[in-house]
Image: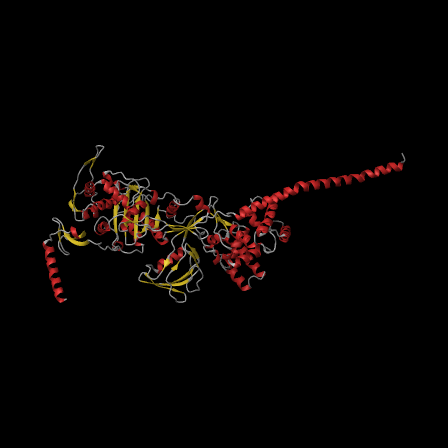
């Protein structure tokens, strides 16, 4: 073969190999496209489905918010400047003496308080911020005016938030609308985090390039290139893992999100989703919650320095935490303010003022998980009757309760002061006594305050609801109520002598008085006022145990009661909350009103879901309650509660002491013209405490009432009843000033027909006076 031909064949072989390789690559690319394109499209559809279903559905599990009652100011309201100031401090109003009032601030000058409220969405609608001047005189609001001097008929302060019911994953957020966000926050956020937000399509290549260059120069990751949309996708849809696959998904989903939704909706979602700190086990999400948590102010009321501080937290909520790392947070905040000035968003003067401003964070974080645990416990139990736990945790409900923060604070202060004083005075072991107090409003049955432990913020065993203890002599008003309904009068004589009763099991029951003394025949009112056991037991057995049980039921007791004779002297276990219900009916003049801790429940969109209205049912004749309340006032005037401090006793309060066997439980229940309260003191191990109702719970109850702005208890005889002066042994009419005369309410038809000699003289004298007056007319 000629050499030339062999050389040609050899020279063609290398040329065919690249062609074959190229052909294989083309075929691979073709089939990859044929197979991969549908997969890629399918994956894009999958990501699009994920974006749509999550973004258009319920985006967040929003906790329920629980609020105290709002303080409503109006001319004539019994209130002092000091108590208004206390309320404003609880609401974290800033004191601004002599200066211009910003929203959420006040200035007090003697009996005049000027304030500017914050806006708030109440159950009945939105109320904007208002400026007002409140003038006080004689313990009341004398005038309520606008800042311009015009008359105001009503001003509502926003209610104190007392806690929340949080989702299982413990995310805490307060949703805000874009139009509620201060414009300076939007400007700062976009300037620092995403300058081209309104022009890019979810991913900003220029920002990525800038970040890459900056990171190469610094030798570390000092700058990110993610847009706000990518940050939202990362927080909202993806796991926090760091990988190229997750980053690719983030970019694709950001593009899809921007294709489907307007910029403003994406920005609003970002403002509500972004992580901005930790409050114990709860993670703080969104600027709305963060504003309350760091500053105690609604987002719309923040100024430039505080806005810049919140934007600082985006780069690291823990690293820049202003409470733990104030200098680091201030440095970053000031850099942000400087950047705003360099970009022409603020002038030099405003920038300098903002850099000089303090960080402004509150000493404590916003709202504790639960501010008043015992009351909050009562609210949750009442809510569970009507709502699923899932709805309470996820639906963003707003629950408006009956709690009065000033009354609650007074109760907590009274418990904190009285228990150590009692332990010291009685030489009891320190920190062994426990207490429970419940305060309600006599008209309407609203629960104003609950204390279930000597420690104000203790969230464990709630003694006000769950400590079911013997109530001792607190049961006796039910015995005397049943007797009055059977025709007995307060003047009816009862034998307070020893006796024995053989029970069905063969045991002997022999009641004895606390002082081990017997008092012979005593009028019915005296037996109750001095809590004589023997007389009460005889009376209860005479009228019959079933009638006493029935009286308890009509007063409001729901638990089953066994009709044993010992019931008459208090062998009945009840919680303080149940006892309050009994005395609530007495304070309500015989009208039963179920206790309630909730006023309204409102959905996240402002729709009222449920109102808990006042319900009233007349169960007892007001004439009978009038007589019984008169005797319970006598308990304070001359009976077992006569040790009550004079200022409180002067209110004409009615009440009853209760002491159980071996001095294990100390009780007092009573009411004024406006409030009802029950106080219990004891030990969790049921050991004796050495305190009667008069030496223990009465002191605590009296201190609670000393801190209340309450009205005196004034009794007006109902039709057919009158206050009459009487003498006993034998029962005769008498007159004021006569020896042994006692004034009691009686039915006119039940007055003794005969008057005592002293009474006759007074009556004849009155007759002559009336005859002379008739001639004069």
Indicate the colouring scheme: secondary structure
The picture places residue 520, in percent across and down from the top left corner, at 15, 44
> Residue 115 appears in which quarter of the rendering?
bottom left
- The quadrant of the picture occupied by the C terminus is bottom left
Question: Image check: 42 left or right of 518?
Answer: right
| Rendered view: 84 above or below 273 | below
The picture places residue 290, in percent across and down from the top left corner, at 49, 52
Judging depth in this view, the residue of 687 and 505 nearest the camera is 505
Question: Image check: 225 left or right of 73?
Answer: right
Question: Image check: 266 left or right of 560?
Answer: right
| Rendered view: 468 above or below 333 | above
Q: Residue at x 57, y 45 (%)?
A: 49
Q: Is residue 186 visible?
A: yes
Q: How many numbered discs, if any?
A: 0
> Residue 296 appears in which quarter of the rendering?
bottom left
- The quadrant of the picture occupied by the N terminus is top right
| Rendered view: 710 above or below 514 | below
The picture places residue 397, in percent across and down from the top left corner, at 44, 49
- Residue at far top of view: 506
Judging depth in this view, the residue of 507 and 331 nearest the camera is 507
Q: Is residue 242 visible?
A: no
The picture places residue 641, in percent across and down from the top left corner, at 24, 49
Judging depth in this view, the residue of 642 and 420 nearest the camera is 642
């Amino acid at each position: 073969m000629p050499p030339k031909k062999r050389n040609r064949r050899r020279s063609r072989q290398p040329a065919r190999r690249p062609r074959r390789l190229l052909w294989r690559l083309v075929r691979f690319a073709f089939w990859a496209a044929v197979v991969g394109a549908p997969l890629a499209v399918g994956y894009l559809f999958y990501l699009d489905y994920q974006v749509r279903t999550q973004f258009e559905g319920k985006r967040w599990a929003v906790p329920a918010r629980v609020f105290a009652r709002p303080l409503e100011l109006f001319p004539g309201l019994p209130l002092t400047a000091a108590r208004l100031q206390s309320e404003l401090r609880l609401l974290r109003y800033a004191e601004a003496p002599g200066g211009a009032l910003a929203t959420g601030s006040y200035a007090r000058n003697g009996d005049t308080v000027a304030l500017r409220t914050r806006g708030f969405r109440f159950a009945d609608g939105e109320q904007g911020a208002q400026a007002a001047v409140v003038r006080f005189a004689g313990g009341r609001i004398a005038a309520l005016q606008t800042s311009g001097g015009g008359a105001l008929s009503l001003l509502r302060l926003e209610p104190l938030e007392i806690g929340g019911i949080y989702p299982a994953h413990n995310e805490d957020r307060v949703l805000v609308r874009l139009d509620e966000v201060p414009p300076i926050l939007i400007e700062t956020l976009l300037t620092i985090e995403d300058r081209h937000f309104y022009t890019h399509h979810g991913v900003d290549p220029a920002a990525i390039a800038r970040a890459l260059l900056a990171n190469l120069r610094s030798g570390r990751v000092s700058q990110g290139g993610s847009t706000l949309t990518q940050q939202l996708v990362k927080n909202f849809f993806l796991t926090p893992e760091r990988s190229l696959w997750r980053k690719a998904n983030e970019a694709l989903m950001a593009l899809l999100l921007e294709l489907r939704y307007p910029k403003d909706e994406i920005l609003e979602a970002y403002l509500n989703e972004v992580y901005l700190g930790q409050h114990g086990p709860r993670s703080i999400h969104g600027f709305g919650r963060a504003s309350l948590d760091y500053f105690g102010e609604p987002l719309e009321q923040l100024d430039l320095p505080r806005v810049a501080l919140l934007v600082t937290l985006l780069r690291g909520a823990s690293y820049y935490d202003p409470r733990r790392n104030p200098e680091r947070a201030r440095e970053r905040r000031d850099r942000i303010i400087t950047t705003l000035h360099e970009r022409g968003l603020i002038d030099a003067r405003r920038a300098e003022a903002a850099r000089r401003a303090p960080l402004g964070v509150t000493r404590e974080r916003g709202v504790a998980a639960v501010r008043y645990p015992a009351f909050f416990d009562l609210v949750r139990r009442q809510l569970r009757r009507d709502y699923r736990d899932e709805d309470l945790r996820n639906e963003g409900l707003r629950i408006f309760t009956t709690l009065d923060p000033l009354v609650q604070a007074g109760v907590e202060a009274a418990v904190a002061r009285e228990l150590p004083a009692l332990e010291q005075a009685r030489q009891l072991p320190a920190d062994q006594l426990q207490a429970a107090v419940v305060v309600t409003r006599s008209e309407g049955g609203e629960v104003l305050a609950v204390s279930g432990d000597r420690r104000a913020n203790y969230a464990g065993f709630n003694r006000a609801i769950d400590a079911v203890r013997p109530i001792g002599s607190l049961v006796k008003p039910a015995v005397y109520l049943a007797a009055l309904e059977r025709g007995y009068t307060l003047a009816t004589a009862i034998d307070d002598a020893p006796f024995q009763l053989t029970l069905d099991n063969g045991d002997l029951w022999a009641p004895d008085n606390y002082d081990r003394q017997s008092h012979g025949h005593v009028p019915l009112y005296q037996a109750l006022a001095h809590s004589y056991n023997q007389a009460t037991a005889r009376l209860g057995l005479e009228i019959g145990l079933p009638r006493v049980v029935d009286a308890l039921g009509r007063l409001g007791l729901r638990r089953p009661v066994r009709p044993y004779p010992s019931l008459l002297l208090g062998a009945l276990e009840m919680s303080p909350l149940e006892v309050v219900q009994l005395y609530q009916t007495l304070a309500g003049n015989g009208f039963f009103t179920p206790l309630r801790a909730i006023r309204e429940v409102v959905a996240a969109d402002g729709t009222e879901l449920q109102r808990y209205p006042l319900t009233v049912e007349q169960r007892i004749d007001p004439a009978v309650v009038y007589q019984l309340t008169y005797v319970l006032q006598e308990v304070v005037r001359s009976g077992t509660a006569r040790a009550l401090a004079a200022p409180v006793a002067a209110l004409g309060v009615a009440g009853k002491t209760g002491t159980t066997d071996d001095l294990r439980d100390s009780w007092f229940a009573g009411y004024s013209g406006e409030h009802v309260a029950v106080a219990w003191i004891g030990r969790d191990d049921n050991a004796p405490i050495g305190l009667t109702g008069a030496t223990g719970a009465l002191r605590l109850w009296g201190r609670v009432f000393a801190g209340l702005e309450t009205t005196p208890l004034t009794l007006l005889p109902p039709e057919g009843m009158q206050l009459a002066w009487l003498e006993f042994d034998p029962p005769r009419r008498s007159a004021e000033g006569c020896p042994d005369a006692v004034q009691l309410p009686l039915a006119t038809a039940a007055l003794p027909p005969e008057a005592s000699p002293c009474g006759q003289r007074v009556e004849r004298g009155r007759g002559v006076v009336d005859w002379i007056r008739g001639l004069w007319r």
